[in-house]
Image (cartoon, grey):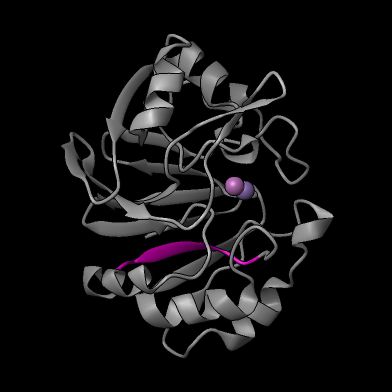
Amino acid sequence: MVKVTFLGHSAFYVESEGLRGLIDPFLTGNPMATSKPEDFPDVNFIFVTHGHGDHIGDTVSIAKNTQATVISNFELSHFFQKQGLMCHPMHIGGVFKFPFGRVKLTNALHGSDVEVEGELVPGGNPVGFLLELGGKKIYHAGDTGLTMDMQLLEKEKVDIAMLPIGGNFTMDIADAVRAVGMIRPEIVIPMHYDTFEVISADPQAFRDQVPQGVRTEILKAGQFLEI
Ligand code: NI
Ligand code: MN
């Protein structure tokens, strides 16, 4: 059993046997978020797709309070380790078997620099996460444009895909629909839209275009899905 709770923007809370995990925990300053960092006192892993502020979010404070291990690319791990966090560095294409399940880092077409005191610090390559937990597979694309690499995911038989639809920085609805056609997940959850005006998108319009046979779950912050 896997429980996936949407927290707004690209943030999710994923619970499964041995995992109380946050993905891209942008809560403070997130106009879509209905939860606070304190609402997750027993997180044990935090997954960070890339270095942008709307994805690192509250990673540092939550990891310090919970002793959670941060899973990210090698370069971001270095950045987090310097701040005293426990990290498990990985990289694109790499798989590691954790006690809760398997994690694979996938390619994302985007940037990953971290803003530190007004300057951009290199943050390696952006990634997505393919998580295999409780007999299910979850793919969180991170921020990305449409890429043919997504075709590689079809064979994985993904149960839930979280895909950005907001455009401007990532895929828009049209490209996210094409991504769904390549990945063919059981369920798709749209993310990374409406948080800011520049990424306004209508998730109903996305749902209307998603290929038949794929269920679209439009979640509001705080709503969850159990599979
Ligand atoms: Ni980004
Ligand atoms: Mn973003």
Q: Residue 164: within the magenta?
A: yes
Q: Residue 6: within the magenta?
A: no
Q: Position of residue 108 (x, y in %)?
A: 43, 56
State whether residue 144 is above or below residue 204: above
Residue depicted at x 53% and y 84%: 210
Residue depicted at x 36% and y 74%: 183
Q: Which residues are magenta?
A: 158-165
Single out the residue that lies furthest toward the bottom: 212
Residue placed most toward the observer, 15 or 89: 89
Residue 1 visible in the displayed image: no
Q: Along the horizontal axis of the image, is 160 left or right of 178?
A: left
Residue 196 visible in the displayed image: yes
Residue depicted at x 72% and y 23%: 118
State whether residue 143 is above or below residue 218: above
Q: Position of residue 191 (x, y in %)?
A: 60, 59
Q: Along the horizontal axis of the image, is 30 left or right of 154?
A: right
Using the rendered view, name the quadrant where residue 181 is placed: bottom left
Residue depicted at x 74% and y 69%: 201
Quarter that holds the C terminus: bottom left
Using the rendered view, name the quadrant where residue 106 is placed: bottom left
Q: Position of residue 33 (x, y in %)?
A: 70, 41
Single out the residue that lies furthest toward the right: 197
